[in-house]
DNA sequence: AAGTCGACCAACCGCATGCGT
DNA sequence: GACGCATGCGGTTGGTCGACT
């Protein structure tokens, strides 16, 4: 049957946003909170598609967005996370709360993809563990022979371990969030920064004024007030990140489908304070599955190795610490 | 100075997903 | 379960700008 377009094609403005439009959008969000984007064009008088409004907010206007060039740490994190998660830009962005998925995607496509390709060419012939060109290679395990499959799986596990370890320990050891990069912003970008700056400090009040349909996002706003990072009204980055990480791990260990998810309690404990649907599902399954699953063992194994290598405890870092970031 | 080219990035588009009825 | 609507996500496009000839 086909879905109707998200907005009327006629009379909808396209192209770059003007400062006036930004102000209209910002003042609306300031008053009503992010969400209910469908209503935004009519309520603000903006001749923009609701999608466009949401995108403009999440990618540009929301407070806590860092602009300018990526730091080495950020770059490394993106590379590692991309290797681990594939082109899940939103998930990757959840580990870099000051960057938008669009930013990361653009950065990957314009800088890192090339870089990795060069690296891959250099390393070609050795092994294909880091063939990240087309996303994670966790799906590479459809080899024909069992021995080959096992070797591939082992390689995947090693790569994932390495990527996970690097990504997390890197984040742990470098307070990237504090780092300031020389902002290379245009004059208009500066003006939008100013707009964003105007928003600093309004979230506490606005989050409490969110209507019930925005409850999902308002909880994030409340969490976000503990830090300047994510106030975007998108699902909790942390919980999403945790979920995605678990999905990645589960895809790695997907062979034990009967055990999957039940291992996630460790990670989900530190998910969004509101408790995600994910957590609920886990708890549900916990009640029906009391055995110690293989994935728990594997997870512990992953975590142990991080500890052994002289890094801080993964659990205490990666999610507890990020809880402060969001 | 003018034209060309490539890099960069904001924004768009279509599909996927979640949620309420 | 089917349906419709709202939102999220990833791929892609197109405009802008600087470097180069």
Image (cartoon, coloured by chain):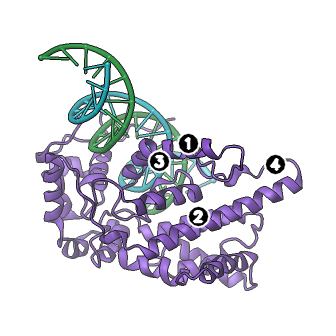
Chain colours: A purple, B green, C cyan
Q: Which residue is mark 4?
A: A143
Name the secondary structure under disc 4.
loop
Q: CA distance from mark 1 to mark 3?
A: 8 Å
Q: Are marks 2 and 4 in contact (CB under 8 Å)?
A: no
- The location of residue A251, given as percent across then percent down, is 67, 61
On the same chain, marks 3 and 4? The answer is: yes
Rendered residue at 57%/82% (across/down) = A310
- Among the two numbered marks 1 and 3 on one chain, the one whose residue lies closer to the N terminus: 3
The numbered dot on residue A163 is 2
- Among the two numbered marks 1 and 4 on one chain, the one whose residue lies closer to the N terminus: 1
Q: Which residue is mark 1?
A: A117
Specify whether residue A262 is in view. yes
- Judged by depth in the image, the label closer to the viewer, 2 or 1, is 1
- Among the two numbered marks 2 and 4 on one chain, the one whose residue lies closer to the N terminus: 4
- The location of residue C17, given as percent across then percent down, is 21, 35
Name the secondary structure under disc 3.
helix
- The location of residue A274, given as percent across then percent down, is 42, 79
Q: CA distance from mark 1 to mark 4?
A: 24 Å
Q: Are marks 1 and 3 in contact (CB under 8 Å)?
A: no
Q: CA distance from mark 2 to mark 4?
A: 23 Å
Q: Which residue is mark 3?
A: A112
Vertical order, A92 against A297 (above or below): above
Q: CA distance from mark 2 to mark 3?
A: 16 Å
């Amino acid at each position: 049957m086909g879905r109707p377009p998200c907005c009327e094609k006629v009379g909808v403005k396209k192209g770059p946003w003007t400062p006036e439009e930004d102000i209209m959008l910002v003042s609306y969000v300031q008053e009503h909170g992010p969400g209910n984007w469908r209503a935004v064009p009519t309520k603000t008088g903006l001749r923009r598609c609701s999608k466009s409004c949401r995108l403009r907010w999440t990618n540009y206007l929301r407070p806590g967005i860092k602009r300018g060039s990526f730091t080495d740490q950020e770059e490394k994190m993106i590379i590692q996370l991309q290797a681990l998660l594939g082109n899940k830009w939103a998930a990757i962005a959840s580990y870099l709360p000051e960057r938008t998925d669009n930013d990361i995607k653009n950065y990957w496509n314009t800088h890192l993809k090339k870089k990795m390709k060069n690296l891959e060419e250099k390393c070609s012939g050795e092994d294909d563990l880091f063939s990240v060109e087309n996303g994670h290679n966790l799906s590479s395990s459809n080899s024909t022979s069992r021995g080959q499959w096992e070797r591939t799986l082992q390689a995947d596990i090693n790569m994932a371990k390495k990527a996970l370890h690097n990504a997390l320990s890197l984040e742990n050891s470098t307070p990237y969030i504090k780092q300031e990069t020389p902002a290379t912003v245009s004059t208009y970008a500066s003006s939008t920064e100013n707009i964003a700056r105007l928003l600093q400090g309004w979230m506490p009040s606005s989050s409490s004024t969110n209507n019930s349909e925005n409850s999902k996002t308002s909880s994030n706003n409340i969490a976000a007030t503990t830090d300047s990072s994510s106030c975007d009204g998108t699902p909790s980055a942390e919980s999403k990140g945790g979920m995605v990480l678990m999905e990645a791990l589960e895809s790695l260990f997907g062979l034990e489908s009967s055990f999957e998810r039940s291992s996630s309690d460790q990670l989900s404990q530190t998910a969004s304070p509101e408790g995600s649907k994910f957590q609920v599902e886990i708890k549900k399954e916990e009640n029906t599955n009391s055995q110690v699953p293989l994935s728990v063992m594997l997870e512990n194994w992953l975590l142990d190795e991080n500890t052994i290598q002289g890094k801080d405890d993964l659990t205490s870092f990666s999610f507890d610490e990020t809880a402060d970031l969001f």
